[in-house]
Amino acid sequence: MRAQPAAPARAADRWADAGLVSGEAVELDVRAARLGSRVLALLIDLMAQVVVALTLLAGLSVLMLVLPTHVVDAALAGALQTVLLVVVLVGYPVLMERFAGGRTVGKLAVGLRVVRADGGPVGVGQSLTRALVGVAVEWPGLVLPLLSWVASVTVMLADPRGRRLGDLVAGTMVVHTRGAGVWRPVPLAVPALVGWAHTLDLTRLDDGLALAARQYLGRVHQLVEPERARLGQALWAEIAAVISPPPPWAAPESVYLAAVLAERHRRSVDRLRRTRGLTAALWPELAAPPVAVAAPPPASIGPAASPSVLRPAAPALAVPTQPDPVRGQPAPVDAERPAG
């Protein structure tokens, strides 16, 4: 019996479409980034680059004011502007991918990452190649801007893994770092089965079998027929053999499993609540909040020194007493009696 069926044959239905294989010849569950997510990441990166450019431009303006008048001229201003453009358009993606693990601000927001074509981490040379090709023929596209944009989009749509021209030249690709699984809570007990669940005898239901049923209910939406039905029937057959009484009416196996697990959880919560209440009644010190202990005073010699007061580890027990025959006052049982 297969709990997880084989992936569909159509490539469009497969999640792991990046084609990355580990050293153990196992295909990695990674999805290649397509045009939509990459354009969204690019727009966020453009806003980040504008912020960086404005910050650097403000710094250069202050520098121009500080420099002597005979040094500042048109050539220096043009050189500083060129350096500013290089830092913003080329330095930004290279430095971000170097120190953020193949991610820029936009890729971090969208959940993308640049990796090598074999799945390894991207290097500085590959990031620099991607940035230079992107500035030249993709964005902003210094060489034939409109034509290069059309060519870049065409290449991304035609490539099976959604790579652009910079990725093809540098030997890289962009993949998603977030899974596509949707969180689904385990279904609660059906109201019609709540009364039956309260009467169940769950003493023979062990933790391992309950955990298997819990995992099945958590992943039931990821399974397909007939494997989903077979696994549910097998789990219910094992649980039905150790619980009683049987369910009052016919229903899918997942409904029975959800009712049994919900009742088991309810009883565990009630048992824990009763245990904590009993512990608080018998040993209040455990339920009391911790008391901050001040630092002990400096040690002194003589009878004035008093030992620090500590909270007892257990409740103090009363010592029975009996009257003292000599003084007529109660004295401890184990007190020394006068010889005579």
Image: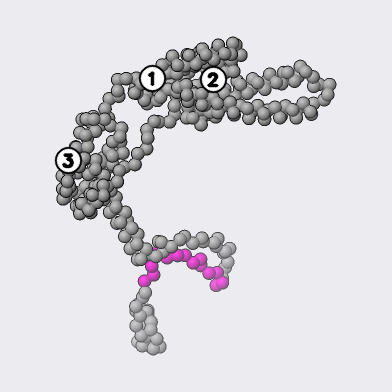
Nearer to me, 221 or 123 = 221
Q: What residue would you read off at disc 3?
A: 237
Magenta span: 303-317
* Residue in the picture at 49% in, 16% down: 153
Mark positioned earlier in the residue sequence (3 or 1): 1
Q: Taking the image as drawn, is residue 98 in sight?
A: no
Compared with 319, 217 (above or below) is above
Q: Position of residue 30 (x, y in %)?
A: 40, 25
Q: Amino acid at mark 3?
A: Ala
Q: Residue at x 31, y 39 (%)?
A: 218
Q: Is residue 310 magenta?
A: yes
> Which color scheme does this rendered protein use?
one colour
Quarter where residue 177 is shown: top left
Sequence-first disc among 2 and 1: 1
Judging by the rendered image, the residue that carries numbered circle 1 is 19
Quadrant of the image containing the C terminus:
bottom left
Front disc: 2 or 3? 3
Question: Could you say which quadrant of the image residue 119 lies in?
Answer: top left
Task: Say which element carries label 1.
Answer: loop
Q: How far apart are the alpha carbons under marks 2 and 3?
A: 56 Å
How many other residues sit within 10 Å of disc 3, few (<14), some (14-19) or many (≥20)? few
Q: Position of residue 4 (x, y in %)?
A: 27, 30
Q: Which residue is mark 2?
A: 127
State how far apart marks 3 and 1 are (Cα). Answer: 40 Å
Residue depicted at 23% across the width and 30% down the height: 225
Callout 2 touching callout 1 (CB < 8 Å): no
Q: Disc 2 and disc 1: Cα gap in Å?
A: 21 Å
- Horizontal and vertical percent for residue 22? 38, 22
Instruction: Identify which amino acid the numbered label 2 is placed on.
Output: Ser
Q: Residues within 10 Å of mark 1 (few under 14, many from 20)?
A: some
Question: Which label was assigned to residue 184?
Answer: none
Reply yes or no: does residue 332 show up in magenta: no
